[in-house]
Image (cartoon, rainbow, N blue to C red):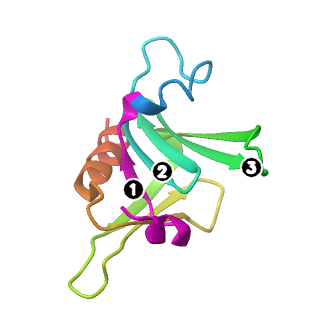
C-alpha cells in the first residue's frame, strides 16, 4: 500500500501483533487481535469478542478515541471486493441503533475474505 492510497484513506493490512502495544489497557484478559487494518493514522481491529475502531486525533496524536462494537450489536455487514477497474474494496457495518453504516475503504491486497470471516465468526456464534 503506497503513500497515495494512505492519503486517500484506503486501508492497508497490519500485523495485529504490531498494534497490540497500542491496545495495551484496552484489551481484556485473554483477548487477542486477530485482524487489523490501518487507515492513515487510524486503525480498526477485530478480536474474538469485538471490533475496535481507533481514531487518533490532533496533530500530535495524543488524543485517541477507542470505539468498541460488540459483535452482538452488528445487525448486518457487507464486503464488496475490488474489480478490474475499481481497485478498492468496501466494508460496511450496520450497528443496532444506527441507521447509517460504518464505512471503510480498503486498498488492493487487503484481506477481504479475512474481514468477512472475522465478522461472520463474531456474529454467527
Which residue has dot 2 on it? 38
Mark 3–mark 1 CB contact (< 8 Å): no
Q: Position of residue 9 (x, y in %)?
A: 53, 67
| In the rendered image, the vertical position of residue 68 relative to residue 59, given as above or below | above
The image quadrant where one finds the C terminus is: top left
In the rendering, which numbered label is found on residue 29? none
Return the disc, 2 or 3, that comes first in the chain's sequence: 2
Instruction: Look at the image and say whether residue 11 sits in the magenta stretch.
Output: yes
Residue at image location 26% in from the left, 88% down from the top: 85
Find residue 46 and report its image quarter.
top left
Question: Disc 3 on helix, strand or loop?
Answer: strand
Which residue has dot 1 on it? 12
Real-space Cα distance between discs 1 and 2? 5 Å
Mark 1–mark 2 CB contact (< 8 Å): yes
Q: Position of residue 81 (x, y in %)?
A: 27, 71
| In the rendered image, the vertical position of residue 104 relative to residue 122, given as above or below | below
Q: Nearer the viewer, residue 57 or 81?
A: 57
Return the disc, 3 or 1, that comes first in the chain's sequence: 1
39 relative position to 123: left or right: right
Residue at image location 39% in from the left, 64% down from the top: 2
Q: Position of residue 76 (x, y in %)?
A: 43, 58
| In the rendered image, the vertical position of residue 4 relative to residue 120, given as above or below | below
Residue at image location 41% in from the left, 60% down from the top: 77
Amino acid at each position: 500500500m503506497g503513500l497515495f492510497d494512505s492519503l486517500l484513506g484506503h486501508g492497508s493490512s497490519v500485523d495485529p501483533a504490531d498494534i497490540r502495544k497500542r491496545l495495551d489497557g484496552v484489551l481484556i484478559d485473554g483477548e487477542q487481535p486477530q485482524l487489523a487494518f490501518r487507515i492513515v493514522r487510524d486503525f480498526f481491529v477485530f478480536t474474538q469478542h469485538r471490533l475496535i475502531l481507533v481514531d487518533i486525533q490532533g496533530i500530535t496524536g495524543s488524543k485517541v478515541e477507542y470505539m468498541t462494537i460488540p459483535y452482538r450489536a452488528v445487525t448486518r455487514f457487507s464486503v464488496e471486493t475490488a474489480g478490474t477497474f475499481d481497485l478498492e474494496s468496501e466494508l460496511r457495518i450496520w450497528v443496532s441503533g444506527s441507521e447509517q453504516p460504518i464505512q471503510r475503504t480498503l486498498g488492493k491486497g487487503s484481506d477481504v475474505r479475512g474481514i468477512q470471516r472475522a465478522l461472520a465468526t463474531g456474529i454467527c456464534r
